[in-house]
Image: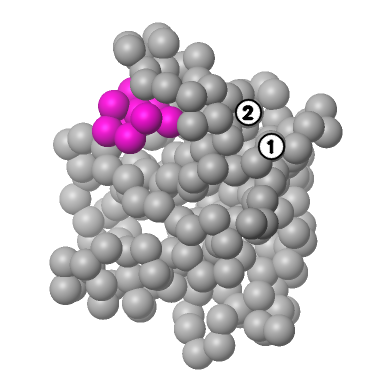
Amino acid sequence: MKNYTIQKDNNENIVVKNIYCIGRNYSEHAEELGNTEPIEPFFFQKSLPSLNTTQKIFMPQNRNIDYEVEIVLLVGKDGVGTSLQDSRSFIDGYAIGIDLTDREYQNQLKSKKLPWLLSKSFSGAAVVSNFLSKPINEDFWLNLNGERKQQGNFKQMTFSYAEQIYFLSNKIPLMKGDIIFTGTPRGVGSLRTKDKVEIGFGNKTLKTITVSSAE
């Protein structure tokens, strides 16, 4: 069976076990999509084959794909958070990622009260940079063709890292190698073939990606 791996800044390769994503964790993003702010965290998953550590996004045919830039956490141990303070100890790395979404299909599934998995899990739909050991405290961002489209800061989250880990791990025990997409700020939009996408934080670019038609 194929292993899906990410790389840390010390060149260590980590096998990814699960990809979790919190929904509507930035109030302005929830508002721009016409959603209410949640009163407790809720999560969905992406499939392992959606993990994308390359410099390419391949657009699925006949589908409109949106970008959502996020801080991504790496889980460094198995278990369940016993408190908010204990939950922080699960974090073993920080990356910038893009949760790619087939928005039209997602809306169709939502209208039928069905899970979002298939709108979030096409090949390459979970883009991540290499993982850093230090927290990302500066504003993180996404540029599209040289123009800043999204910018946010972890302080704007409705639910903190610790709150997310505590809630999630008490529903599904976490595993070393799990990664968690922690929410996107306002400004999501659509990608087109030949677009150039850059993601990073502060004045540091972590990843430059080109958008191509599906192979």
Image position of 108 (left or right of 49): left
Q: Quick one: which residue is furthest to the bottom in this view?
A: 62
What's the magenta region? Answer: 165-174
- Please tell me how many numbered marks the rendered image carries: 2
Residue type indicated by callout 1: Ile
Residue drawn at point x = 40 percent, y = 52 percent: 45
- In front here: 116 or 156? 116
Q: Quadrant of the image for the C terminus? A: bottom right
Q: Position of residue 72 (x, y in %)?
A: 55, 39
**Foreground label between 1 and 2:** 1
Image position of 148 (left or right of 130): left
Residue drawn at point x = 76 percent, y = 61 percent: 55
Q: Position of residue 58 (x, y in %)?
A: 66, 75
**Which residue, given by chain and number where applicable, does mark 2 sit on?**
93
Q: Secondary structure beneath disc 2? A: strand
Residue type indicated by callout 2: Gly
Q: Can residue 91 be seen here?
A: no
Q: Position of residue 130 (x, y in %)?
A: 73, 41
Gap in Å between the C-alphas at discs 1 and 2? 11 Å
**Which residue, given by chain and number where applicable, does mark 1 sit on?**
14
- In front here: 55 or 215? 215
Residue 198 belongs to the span the image colors magenta: no
Q: Can residue 20 be seen here?
A: yes
Residue drawn at point x = 54 percent, y = 43 percent: 17
- In front here: 113 or 31? 113
Classify 111 as above or below 133: below
